[in-house]
Image (tube, rainbow, N blue to C red):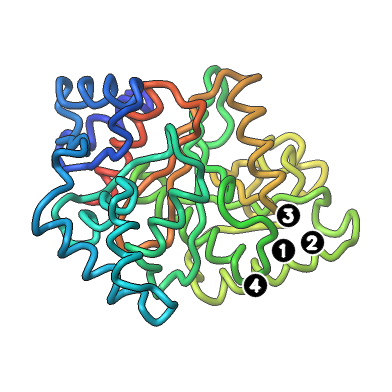
Amino acid sequence: MDTISMIRQKARNKKRTIVLPEYADARVVEAAGIIEKEGIAKVLLLTPDKMIGQEKENFAQDFYELRKAKGMSLELARKTIDDPLYYAAMMTRKGLVDGFVAGASNTTPSVVRAAIQCLEVDERISIVSSAFIMVVPNTSYGENGTLIFADCGVIPEPNARQMAFVAISSAELATKVLGFSPRIAMLSYSTRGSAQGESIDRIGEAQALVRELAPDLLIDGELQVDAALVPEVAKIKYPDSPLGGRANILIFPNLDAGNIGYKLVQRLAGARAVGPILLGLKKPCSDLSRGCLVQDIIDCVAVTAIRAQ
């Protein structure tokens, strides 16, 4: 079974309810119909008629309590909850649904802001980041063509601690959703000392922290991407690498590299890019690229549903 089919089937096995707040986007409406028809998840399309009554006031009161220490007023909380993004996030927080997916017509910062303010950050992870599940046709790289790219959507210039938790969060995603054993490469323009620079030092610190916090994870770096993915190149550039050119999770040094990298692979190699999946929150949710296709929305809902199982 190919990766996308496996993800959708895994979501069907233990169906969860996902709310879609972008009710006016035709792609979202079409995706919702397909998801329901194929039994991938239960979908709540959050039209304005569903954002009424005592529930709406309760959400405003709860949001005010969450944010009042940061200057939130009750009046502003009520206005904020009028935004379907925040309403969907509060539904997820309160357990009325199992997760939310948005971003087809909202920017990533807007989706991430609503998620952080309503769902809150998981104390174990301490940061919010994002990852893409990349399914690349006609290649054996990664896990038979399936890889995780992170962070491609949230942290512009991660420090060592942030990079470490991006790696740990991505490994959890690989295990939970894809069912494969993580093999993590921390990417750079250098392979194990072939060059020097501040970003390389940061990668070394991040790798040491991962080994301290999650000693069972297989991780290596700094690695150029060919040494991370191609066994023949790894033998030449770094024959002692424990990854041996077989990485299935790629951790990028900054957001420029991550965002450019996933879009290049998506467009030039015809890869399916599922995400960005938001990591490090107390409840599952996913962002979408505003250039997403209907199939991308379906796949993000399936991944979010699996994470909620």
Tell me which amino acid carries mark 4. Ala
* Mark closer to the observer (2, 4): 2
Tell me the SS state at disc 4.
Answer: helix
Choose the circle earlier in sequence order: 2 or 4. 2
251 is higher (above) or lower (below) than 46: below
From mark 1 to mark 3, how far is it between C-alphas? Answer: 18 Å
Q: Quadrant of residue 222?
A: bottom right
Choose the circle earlier in sequence order: 1 or 3. 1
Between 210 and 273, the residue placed more toward the observer is 273
Q: Please report contact status of discs 1 and 3: CB closer than 8 Å, yes or no.
A: no
| Residue tagged 4 | 208
| Residue tagged 2 | 199
From mark 4 to mark 1, how far is it between C-alphas? Answer: 9 Å
Tell me which amino acid carries mark 1. Ile
Between 259 and 137, the residue placed more toward the observer is 259
From mark 3 to mark 4, how far is it between C-alphas? Answer: 17 Å
* 147 left or right of 264 in image: left
| Residue tagged 3 | 240
Tell me which amino acid carries mark 2. Ser
* Mark closer to the observer (3, 4): 4
* Mark closer to the observer (3, 2): 2
